[in-house]
């Protein structure tokens, strides 16, 4: 390869060193023209000022050389004895930087000055870090409090959902769980894993506390309802679910039936406070906002049912709960002491007529306190009923009448309203007998019995207000 190189040392700083160019310490911007024959593969030794920072290689137009422009490229330059060898020129050529790249830019008079990139000094970096640290110290407590509040709200919502799911499970399965299986029942109702119920997102264990005075059907938990139900009203059917979003709960808090002092004081503690009166929390260093309590009173889940047998030609109707089975159905007696009974809401009541294999008379979902009586071989709705299962719907009228304020001056005192109701029932029964006989003449026994029952009903009604039975006027309270 042949190449002609002409250095143009027009830069002011280069001009100062023209008489004796040295390879040491010089850092100058210079321009040179280079031409070589076509097909040359690389540049050979280009002597330049050591430490060259910016170089423009230009082929003059019309010289037969291909015009090219290499802009602002850094070179390493070192000297050999009488000349200077340019290391990097061949590298530049091999990368295509001298192979016509930039053609058409030859009209530029030189390279643009390189922009300086200034880095942070150590002192500036320390200052920035100090400002960040101050801001973090100021904002961190507020941020942590907000996170705790959010976690507390989420935990309260979770415990409430557990309480609702527990009650739904009880009404659906007619079963109240104990401390050993409450979590699995709730998890099944919610469709989640059991560990999602027993442990909080902060890896704190949740606890299920049972009132030590709880009694259902004469026993504690667990309770499985049968057709017999509970002969007495459930006593203290209360449970609690406890959790903490901060300090772990004290060792004295364990799932199961706790002491009366612990349960009562925890139940009565205001939200956001520590139940210090509860022995289990003595010395606990957690905050009141850390403690989350879900109280569940199961009393509203129980309804009162009254069944009775009055005048019927045949004996022994039966009933069952949640099972249509005459064989296992329970006989309804006329003994007052046998009733009422208490059952879980949404239980299904099956009422059977008399007989060896009694027929199913009716069935009803128990959603509130209710009562039925077996009269004239038919089940009828009574006080508090949803309506008659047979016959005319007068249950609500009778209920309001008996609940009215009594006249103490009536013929039979405060019992006069019950006498009136019974007289009405007797009259309707005698009228039914007369109708069943085909409405015979006035001399027939059935007709005479109906007339006498009618007279007794009229006397009972008049005995409530007429003559000396008139109530004394009193001022309204």
Image (spheres, helix red, strand yellow):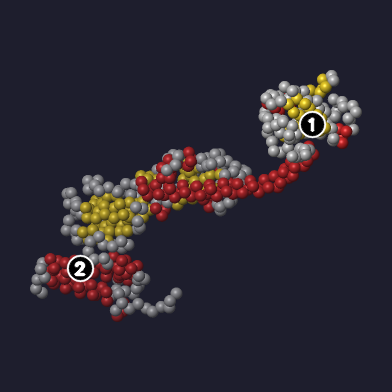
Question: Which image quadrant: the N terminus?
Answer: top right
- Reply above or below: 229 against 85: below
What label does residue 243 carry, if any? none
Task: Say whether residue 446 is left or right of residue 210.
Answer: left
Q: Nearer the viewer, mark 2 or mark 1?
A: 1
Observer-nearest of 348 and 409:
348
What label does residue 32 carry, if any? 1
Q: Position of residue 25 (x, y in %)?
A: 85, 28
**Number of numbered discs visible in the structure rendering:** 2
Q: Residue extending furthest bottom?
A: 467
Q: Position of residue 313 (x, y in %)?
A: 16, 58
Q: Position of residue 264 (x, y in %)?
A: 51, 50
Task: Say whether residue 27 is left or right of residue 419.
Answer: right
Residue 206 in sight: yes
First in sequence, mark 2 or 1: give its number: 1
* Quarter occupied by residue 475: bottom left
Question: Which image quadrant: the C terminus?
Answer: bottom left
Could you tell me which secondary element the residue under label 2 belongs to? helix
What label does residue 428 carry, if any? 2
- Reply above or below: 15 against 282: above
Q: Residue extending furthest top?
A: 81
């Amino acid at each position: 390869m042949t190449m002609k190189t002409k250095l143009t040392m027009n830069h002011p700083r280069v001009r100062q060193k023209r008489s004796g160019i040295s390879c040491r310490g010089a850092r100058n911007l210079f321009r040179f023209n280079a031409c070589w024959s076509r097909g040359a593969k690389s540049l050979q030794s280009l002597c330049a000022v050591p430490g060259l920072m910016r170089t423009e290689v230009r082929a003059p137009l019309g010289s037969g050389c291909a015009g090219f422009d290499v802009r602002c490229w850094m070179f390493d330059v070192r000297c050999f004895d009488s000349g200077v060898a340019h290391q990097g020129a061949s590298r530049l050529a091999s990368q295509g930087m001298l192979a016509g790249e930039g053609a058409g830019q030859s009209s530029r008079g030189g390279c643009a000055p390189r922009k300086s990139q200034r880095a942070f000094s150590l002192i500036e970096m320390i200052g920035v870090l100090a400002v960040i640290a101050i801001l973090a110290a100021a904002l961190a407590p507020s941020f942590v409090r907000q996170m705790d509040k959010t976690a507390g709200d989420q935990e309260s919502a979770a415990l409430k959902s557990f309480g609702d799911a527990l009650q739904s499970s009880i009404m659906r399965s007619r079963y109240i769980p104990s401390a050993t299986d409450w979590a699995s029942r709730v998890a099944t109702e919610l469709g989640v894993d059991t560990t999602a119920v027993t442990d909080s997102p902060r890896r704190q264990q949740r606890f299920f506390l049972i009132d030590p005075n709880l009694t259902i059907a004469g026993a504690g938990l667990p309770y499985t309802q049968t057709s017999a139900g509970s002969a007495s009203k459930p006593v203290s059917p209360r449970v609690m679910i406890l959790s903490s979003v901060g300090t772990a709960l004290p060792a004295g808090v364990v799932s199961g039936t706790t002491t009366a002092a612990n349960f009562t004081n925890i139940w009565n503690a205001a939200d956001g406070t520590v139940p210090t009166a509860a022995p289990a929390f003595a010395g606990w260093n957690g905050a009141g906002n850390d403690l989350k309590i879900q109280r569940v009173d199961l009393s509203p889940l129980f309804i009162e049912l009254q069944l009775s047998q009055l005048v019927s030609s045949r004996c022994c109707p039966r009933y069952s709960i949640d099972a249509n089975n005459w064989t296992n159905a329970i006989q309804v007696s006329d003994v007052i002491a046998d009733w009422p009974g208490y059952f879980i809401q949404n239980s299904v009541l099956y009422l059977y007529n008399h007989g060896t294999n009694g027929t199913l008379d009716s069935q009803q979902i128990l959603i509130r306190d209710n009562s039925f009586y077996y009269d004239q071989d038919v089940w009828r709705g009574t006080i508090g009923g949803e309506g008659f299962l047979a016959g005319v719907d007068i249950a609500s009228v009778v209920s309001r009448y008996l609940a009215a304020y009594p006249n103490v001056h009536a013929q039979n005192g405060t019992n006069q309203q019950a006498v009136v109701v019974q007289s009405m029932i007797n009259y309707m029964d005698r009228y039914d007998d007369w109708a069943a006989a085909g409405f015979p003449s006035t001399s027939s026994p059935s007709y005479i019995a109906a007339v006498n029952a009618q007279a007794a009903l009229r006397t009972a009604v008049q005995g409530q207000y007429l003559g000396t039975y008139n109530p004394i006027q009193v001022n309204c309270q």
